[in-house]
Amino acid sequence: MTTEEQRRKVKALAGFGVRQKDICAIIGLRSPKTLRKRFGRELELGVVEARAQVTQAAFKLATSGRDPASTMLWLKSRARWGVKDPESEVREEVYNIIDWEPDPEEPEAEDAHDSGMIFEKARPKPPASGGDELAGEPEEEDEE
């Protein structure tokens, strides 16, 4: 025969996470099978009610604003923050990456490799053989 005190004790011990074999030793039963037969409802309710109490305490702490870590844990575990759901209506941003090509450069001077700099209106260097520097170019006259 089971007493109300035994029922409360089994329920509490199950909620604390005590193994059924150890609960049997505390209550005075021979086997966990007998414990499950006589106190099955208390074993289930003890675990469920303990989990509910801890969840309630964690929720109060998370919503109080005093513990940001609890708030973040609650948001990640219960509000699914940080979880990517492929069936969600929210989609990730899509970026189109286009290879950018600069405008074509103007033709370089023929001997640009000597100076390392290109001047757009600079005259090309004369050939190494010497001679007339302006050969082939019309002479400019000063108008003064």
Image (spheres, grey):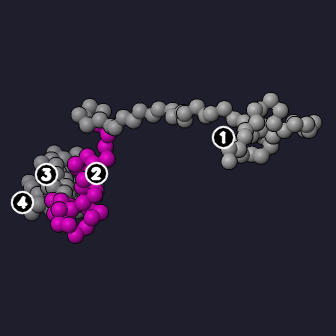
Q: Which residue is mark 4?
A: 4
Write down the residue under mark 2.
76
Q: Residues within 10 Å of mark 4 (few under 14, many from 20)?
A: few
Residue 45, which numbered label?
A: 3
Residue visible at 22% across and 48% down? 79
Upstream in sequence: badge 4 or badge 2? 4
Q: Residue 7: percent from the left, percent from the top? A: 11, 57
Q: Is the C-beta separation of discs 3 and 2 under 8 Å?
A: no
Q: Quadrant of the N terminus?
A: bottom left
Q: Secondary structure at mark 2?
A: helix
Magenta-drawn stretch contains 93: no
Q: Which residue is mark 1?
A: 120
Number of marks present in the image shown: 4
Disc 1 and disc 3: Cα gap in Å?
89 Å
Mark 4 to mark 2 CA distance (whole Å)? 41 Å
Q: Secondary structure at mark 3?
A: helix
Q: Amino acid at mark 3?
A: Leu
Tell me the quarter of the picture where residue 15 sits. bottom left
**Corner quadrant of residue 37:** top left
Q: Amino acid at mark 2?
A: Lys
Residue 74 location, x and y as percent? Answer: 24, 55
- Does the magenta segment cover residue 69? yes
Number of the front mark, 3 or 4: 3
